[in-house]
Amino acid sequence: MTEAGGRLAGVEGAKRLLSAWVLLVAAHSYGVGAFLLFATAWGARFGGFGEVSPLFFARQAGIFHFVIATAYLVERFVHGGVVILLMAKATAVVFLVAVWLLGVDAWSIPLSAAGDAAMGIATFVLARRAGALPG
């Protein structure tokens, strides 16, 4: 195999890996959304927030997770990109770190920030290898 052919095979493999990764990240967001929407009170207590009232805003966050997960999939499988996913993860990390530093002490906040950061970094690395980022 020529060097150019090897690079092409490597890029195609990276694209497949990136697509599989986006499916996993979207599945995670659908799972979080389902807990927020359908197990709202239990999920808030489990996450360290105690009682949440009204449940409307936590449930609204659940619906948002469904919308954003779907946006990840549409962008990847229709348009070939991951910019929405990267922006969502970066925004989530900034928000979560800020509220944690401002004193919201639920155990799930720093863990969620770390998870979103890891997902964002992994997506960025895979997207660079797959040539899926503009520029």
Image (tube, rainbow, N blue to C red):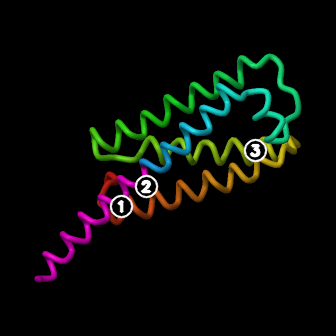
Image vertical order of residue 13 relative to residue 29, above or below: below
Q: Residue at x 46, y 57 (%)?
A: 123
Q: Could you classify mark 2 by the number of other residues whose Cα lies within 10 Å: few (under 14), some (14-19), or many (20 or more)?
A: some
Labels 2, 3: front one: 2
- Label 3 sits on a secondary structure element that is helix
Per the image, the residue denoted by label 3 is 98
The answer to whether residue 14 is left or right of residue 67 is left
Mark 1 highlights which residue?
17
Would residue 98 be found to the left or right of residue 83 on screen? right
Question: Which residue is pictured at 75% across the width and 44% down the height?
Answer: 98
Residue located beneath label 2 in the image: 21
State which region is magenta. 1-22
For badge 2, the amino acid type reads Trp
Marks 2 & 3, CB-CB < 8 Å contact: no
Q: Residue at x 44, y 64 (%)?
A: 125
The quarter of the image holding the N terminus is: bottom left
| Left or right, 115 with reference to 99 | left
In the rendered image, the vertical position of residue 44 relative to residue 10, given as above or below: above
Picture coordinates of residue 10, whole percent (x, y): 25, 71
**Residue 20: quadrant of the picture:** bottom left
Classed neighbour count for the residue bearing mark 3: other residues with Cα under 10 Å, few (<14), some (14–19), many (≥20): some
